[in-house]
Image (cartoon, rainbow, N blue to C red):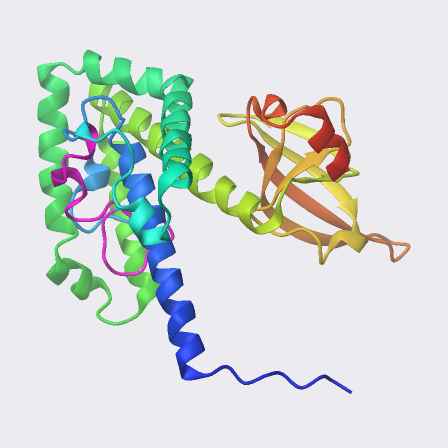
C-alpha cells in the first residue's frame, strides 16, 4: 500500500513560499551584483537589454532577466551583493563568509577569457559601431513594443516568447564590425555569469558533487564552449537529466560537463542507450580536489 501523505497546512505552505521568495531575492541580488562587475557597467550598449527582449521582459522567459531597475541601483559601487544576509536571515561570520564567497566568484569571473574579450570589445567600439548599436536598439525597441508583440500573438505565452527571441536574434545578426563584436562579447560574458553562478551553483546545491558517467562513443564537436556527445547505459535514465553536471570516465575530457540534451536510442538487438549532448565546463577539473572527485565516482 502507498503510505499516506501528511496534509500540508496553509500555514506550512505560506512559510515555504515565504522562504522560497527570500531565497529567490537573494539569488537575483547576487546575480545582479555579479553583472555589475562587467566592464563599463551600467552602460551596456548591447540591444539585448532594450525593453521586451528575452533578457528584460516581465513576461515568461527561460533566461534570468535583468530587472528594470537593476542598472540604477549603484551595484557597481557595492563591495558585495546587497540584502543577501537579510533575505537569508544570516548574520555575523556566516554573512561575512557569504560576502567573501561572492567576491571570490566575481574575481574569478573577471579573470576569464569572456570578460577580457568583452573589455576589449568595449574599448574597440568606434563611432560607427556606437551609432550602429543605437540605431539597432531603437529599431528593436519598436519591434518589441507591447502593441507589436500583441499584434503577433495577443495571448499565448510561447509564441510571444518566440517572437521576442526571433526579433532580438535578427537585430544582433544585423550588426556589423565593432558593434557585432561587442554584442557577441556581451552574449558570452552574460551567459558565463548565468551558467556559473546560477545553473551550476543550483545543480551543486540540489545534487552535491557531480557523479561520474561511463561514457562511450564520445565525440568532441568544438565550438565555444566545447560541445561533446556520448552514450551511457539506459540504467541511468532516472539518474541524469538536462542541466546535470557530471564527470566522464574518459581521459579525453578531464573537466566536468553540463548535460544539454538527451534521447534514447534502441538498436536492432533491443538494447537501449542514452545519447547525450553536453558542454565542457572549461577548467573545472581543478575546481574539485581529487578526494571529492573520487568520492563521486
Tell me if residue 64 is in the magenta stretch: yes
Tell me if residue 4 is in the magenta stretch: no
**Image spot of residue 278 (x, y percent):** 60, 38
**Image spot of residue 246 (x, y percent):** 66, 39
Is 118 or 79 nearer to us in this picture?
79
Is 251 or 139 nearer to us in this picture?
251
**Is residue 32 shown left or right of residue 137?**
right
- The extreme right residue here reads 269
Is 250 or 147 nearer to us in this picture?
250
**Is residue 149 visible in this depiction of the protein?**
yes
Is residue 130 placed above or below 29 in the rendered structure?
above
Counting the numbered discs, the total is 0
**Is residue 64 visible in this depiction of the protein?**
no
Residues drawn in magenta: 56-76
Is 101 or 162 nearer to us in this picture?
101
Q: What quarter of the picture does the N terminus occupy?
A: bottom right
- Name the residue: 11% across, 23% down: 130
Q: Quadrant of residue 80?
A: top left
- Name the residue: 18% across, 65% down: 150
Q: Quadrant of residue 172?
A: top left
Q: What quarter of the picture does the C terminus occupy?
A: top right
**Image spot of residue 24 (x, y percent):** 36, 54
Is residue 38 placed above or below 244 in the rendered structure?
above
- Name the residue: 73% across, 84% down: 2
**Image spot of residue 173 (x, y percent):** 28, 33
Dominant SS type (magenta): loop
Is residue 3 placed above or below 257 in the rendered structure?
below
Amino acid at each position: 500500500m502507498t503510505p499516506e501523505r501528511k496534509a500540508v497546512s496553509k500555514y506550512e505552505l505560506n512559510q515555504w513560499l515565504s522562504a522560497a521568495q527570500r531565497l529567490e531575492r537573494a539569488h537575483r541580488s547576487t546575480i545582479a551584483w555579479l553583472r555589475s562587475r562587467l566592464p563599463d557597467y551600467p552602460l551596456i550598449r548591447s540591444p539585448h537589454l532594450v525593453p521586451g527582449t528575452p533578457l528584460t521582459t516581465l513576461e515568461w522567459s527561460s533566461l534570468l532577466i535583468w530587472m528594470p531597475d537593476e542598472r540604477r541601483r549603484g551595484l557597481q559601487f557595492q563591495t558585495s551583493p546587497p540584502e543577501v544576509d537579510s533575505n537569508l536571515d544570516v548574520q555575523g561570520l556566516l554573512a561575512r563568509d557569504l560576502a567573501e564567497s561572492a567576491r571570490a566568484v566575481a574575481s574569478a569571473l573577471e579573470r576569464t577569457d569572456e570578460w577580457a574579450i568583452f573589455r576589449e570589445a568595449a574599448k574597440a567600439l568606434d563611432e560607427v559601431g556606437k551609432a550602429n548599436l543605437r540605431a539597432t536598439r531603437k529599431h528593436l525597441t519598436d519591434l518589441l513594443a507591447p502593441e507589436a508583440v500583441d499584434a503577433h500573438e495577443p495571448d499565448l505565452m510561447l509564441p510571444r516568447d518566440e517572437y521576442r527571441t526571433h526579433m532580438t536574434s535578427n537585430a544582433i545578426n544585423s550588426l556589423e564590425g565593432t558593434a557585432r563584436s561587442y554584442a557577441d562579447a556581451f552574449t558570452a560574458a552574460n551567459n558565463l555569469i548565468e551558467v556559473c553562478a546560477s545553473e551550476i551553483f543550483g545543480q551543486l546545491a540540489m545534487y552535491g558533487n557531480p557523479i561520474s558517467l561511463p561514457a562511450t562513443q564520445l565525440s568532441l564537436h568544438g565550438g565555444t564552449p566545447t560541445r561533446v556527445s556520448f552514450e551511457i547505459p539506459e540504467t541511468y535514465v532516472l539518474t541524469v537529466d538536462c542541466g546535470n553536471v557530471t564527470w566522464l570516465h574518459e581521459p579525453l575530457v578531464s573537466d566536468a560537463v553540463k548535460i544539454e540534451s538527451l534521447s534514447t536510442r534502441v538498436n536492432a538487438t533491443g538494447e537501449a542507450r542514452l545519447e547525450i549532448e553536453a558542454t565542457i565546463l572549461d577548467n573545472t577539473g581543478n575546481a574539485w580536489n581529487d578526494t571529492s572527485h573520487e568520492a563521486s565516482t
